[in-house]
Amino acid sequence: MLNKNKTIIGVACGGFGSEREISLKSGAVVFESLKMSGWNVFLLIVNSKNWYVKISENKEITLSMIDFSFNYNNTRYKIDVIFNTIHGPPGENGQLASKLKSKNIPHTSCDEFSAKLTYNKRECISSVKKYKIPSAKSVHLDKGKPFDEIRIIEKIGLPCFVKANKAGSSFGVYKITNKNKLRWGIKNAFLEDNEILIESELKGREVSVGVYKANDKIICLPITEIISENDFFDYEAKYLGKAKEITPAQIPNNWKINVTEMAIKLYKNLNLKGVCRSDFIFVNNIPHLIEINTVPGLTKESIIPKQCEAAGIKLNKFFEDLLDEAMA
């Protein structure tokens, strides 16, 4: 259990993917919230080569990866629990979970298997079909292998979306409305990942559902409806204000019940942990899964903090609940 006098918390952020800058902002929000609440908390910046503790703008201390400890002011600190805010690798793809498991350090996100599964869009969508959760039609491509644009369009149709298979924050996602642009979209998506998905367009109302566990109970946060000014909920819409987000969503009650049940079913059956955000589009009154985010954004612009506000949950209490559950 958490103890304000004893527990040393590390908020991990950064990483080495396209979402690094967003992760740094998420980490700063969590760090400041816990610090203001009186916790022994340190901000851990993760790079491809090492981790370091950010003491101030001008002072950084290397973190020992042997036992996740460091020296500061003549005192040896050892991290007891990690609050994971790394979007993308290594925080969301299972690498961090594997590392922390080997060191017996609890953390606020999924285990290695669940993280790998949900980070891989193709594997995730394929896996949830057995739970009768609908999604878009899709085609999978590997970099360097030949593909037939005509057959892809015959199967998927236009408009369609070309997506990097392992990426978040809509990096490597392109909406294709003209068949002559398909190869361009594929080429650019391959710059983000060696595997891509081409999905049919789902036309309908988009919602986002945050789910977490506290006191051994799975809790669904107020649903958010997303109305993007752009063609889809891309990076600009997510972080630069180019979308209208309505929380709680003004959708029919039966829609709320249905999508909530689906989000909780995913959380249980995929063995998810911490806070996760599942995105859906309603097509003919039925929610279709877009993707699952196991380390969702926690910046001031992000959906989860807004859902907490709508639920009357203070962020510091929310973060403490996630840490408590990690150490349970």
Image (cartoon, rainbow, N blue to C red):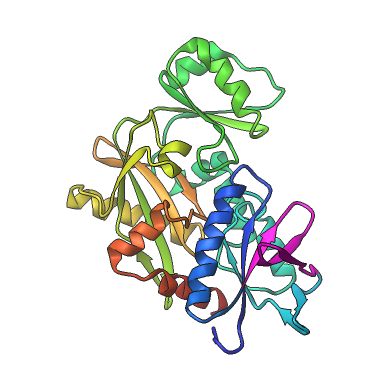
Mark count: 0
Image quarter (top left, top right, bottom left or bottom right) of the C terminus: bottom right
Residue 267 is drawn in which quadrant? bottom left
Membership of 293 in magenta stretch: no
Residue 300 is drawn in which quadrant? bottom left
Range shown magenta: 42-65
Identify which residue is drawn at 49% across, 51% down: 293
Membership of 60 in magenta stretch: yes
Provide residue 296's location: percent of width, then percent of height: 49, 54
Identify which residue is drawn at 44% across, 73% down: 316
Vertical placement of 193 versus 75: above or below?
A: above
**Near-viewer residue (100 or 4):** 4
Single out the residue that lies furthest toward the left: 252
Residue 264 visible within the image: no
Provide residue 241's location: percent of width, then percent of height: 38, 41
Q: Is residue 50 left or right of residue 149?
A: right
